[in-house]
């Protein structure tokens, strides 16, 4: 018999004085009454991003690079009118969550890999293999960073995986050469400098800009659909003021709260602590700030870390869970 275990380590929703809605009250009851019993019902709402009309962000993976947080690594989907049109990141666990969310490879218009650390890219070949069974024929644009130092750029990364002769997954080489009617990947590398346009269609525009993540080339993405703007800050240390302009007045800003406030050394060169995330959000002023990409060490004092964020940012703060759905109108839904 299928056992449905609680997936989440906590459900938090900070919306100022109007925090206790009926929905959040029911969630609280579920946590207090149901979770100690060790089971939680598997409602469809856990794996669907509502509303099906309009634009919504679904968190596929809210965890970090260490297998200590009970979460998939970084991945997000943007839903537009019931279709998963954009995938940002494909860290470990994305393959499973992508299917649980009901997303379909053939609906994707764009994939952005913010950087090529495993917790942002390791499940990408698995998704390609899954997509190989779909009826997709049109190319799939994929964007990621230009290489730097020891880190390959997106194109070399794809060749290392998919080249017919030398690739680790050479059996998927059709994604590079179109053999057998396989949809081609069309890679686009993002260099340092001003933000660049990555995709534009009737109702979807995507830009990217490099963000500082130690020595690791990394990219933030901005997805605009209709009147909704969703910005994915990626892993970054928060030191580039240009990112505030890039993210300004977004409907939803996703920031990665990987490290605690007292982080130092390499960790600080890679990641922004909670207070810096708060400053970025305070200056860029999104309607909703989604905190994600947790490790056990940033979940440990989560309430205190969120309080640090809220010192400089007074809008809605959503603490991400896997499969959580965030709408621009109503904050988090569906979990
Ligand atoms: Zn990461």
Image (spheres, rainbow, N blue to C red):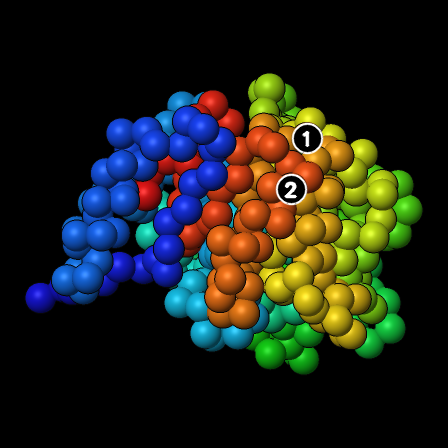
Residue 215, image x and y in percent?
Answer: 82, 68
Residue that badge 2 annotates: 311
Question: Could you say whether the residue bearing mark 2 is in a helix, strand or loop?
Answer: helix
Question: Could you say whether the residue bearing mark 1 is in a helix, strand or loop?
Answer: loop
Residue at 71% across / 57% down in the picture? 272
Tell me the CA gap for discs 2 and 1.
Answer: 13 Å
Residue 65 lies in quadrant: bottom right
Residue 267 lies in quadrant: bottom right
Residue 177 lies in quadrant: bottom right
Q: Is residue 158 visible?
A: no
Residue at 62% across / 64% down in the picture? 260
Identify the disc placed on residue 194: none
Q: Earlier in the sequence, mark 2 or mark 1?
A: 1
Residue 279, image x and y in percent?
Answer: 73, 43
Residue 190, image x and y in percent?
Answer: 80, 51
Viewer-proximal residue among 102 and 49: 49
Residue at 25% across / 51% down in the picture? 31
Residue that badge 1 annotates: 285
Residue at 85% across / 41% down in the picture? 242
Q: Compared with residue 179, is residue 287 higher up or lower down, i.e. above or below? A: above
Q: Quadrant of the C terminus?
A: top left
Q: Compared with residue 196, is residue 250 higher up or lower down, i.e. above or below? A: above
């Amino acid at each position: 018999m299928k056992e449905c275990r609680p997936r989440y380590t906590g459900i938090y929703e900070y919306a100022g004085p109007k925090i206790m809605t009926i929905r959040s009250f029911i969630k609280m009851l579920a946590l207090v009454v149901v979770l100690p019993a060790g089971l939680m019902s598997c409602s469809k709402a856990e794996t669907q991003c509502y509303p099906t009309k309009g634009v919504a962000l679904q968190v596929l993976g809210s965890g970090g690079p260490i297998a200590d947080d009970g979460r998939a690594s970084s991945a997000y989907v943007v839903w537009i009118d019931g279709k998963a049109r954009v995938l940002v990141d494909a860290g470990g666990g994305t393959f499973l969550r992508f299917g649980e969310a009901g997303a379909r490879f053939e609906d994707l218009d764009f994939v952005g890999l913010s950087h090529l650390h495993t917790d942002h890219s390791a499940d990408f070949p698995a998704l390609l293999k899954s997509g190989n069974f779909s009826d997709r024929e049109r190319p799939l644009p994929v964007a990621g960073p230009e290489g730097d130092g020891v880190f390959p750029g997106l194109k070399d990364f794809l060749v290392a995986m998919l080249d017919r002769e030398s690739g680790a997954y050479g059996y998927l080489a059709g994604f590079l050469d179109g053999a057998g009617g396989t949809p081609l990947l069309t890679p686009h590398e993002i260099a340092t400098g001003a933000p660049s346009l990555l995709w534009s269609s009737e109702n979807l525009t995507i830009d990217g800009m490099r963000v500082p993540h130690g020595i690791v080339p990394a990219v933030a993405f901005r997805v605009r659909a209709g009147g909704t703007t969703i910005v994915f800050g990626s892993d970054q240390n928060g030191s580039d003021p240009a990112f505030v302009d890039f993210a300004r007045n977004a409907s939803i800003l996703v920031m990665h709260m990987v490290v605690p406030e007292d982080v130092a050394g390499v960790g600080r060169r890679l990641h922004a602590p909670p207070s810096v995330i708060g400053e970025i959000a305070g200056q860029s002023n999104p309607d909703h700030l989604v905190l994600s990409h947790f490790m056990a060490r940033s979940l440990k004092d989560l309430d205190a870390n969120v309080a640090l964020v809220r010192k400089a940012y007074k809008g809605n703060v959503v603490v991400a869970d896997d499969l959580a759905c965030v709408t621009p109108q109503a904050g988090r839904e569906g979990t």
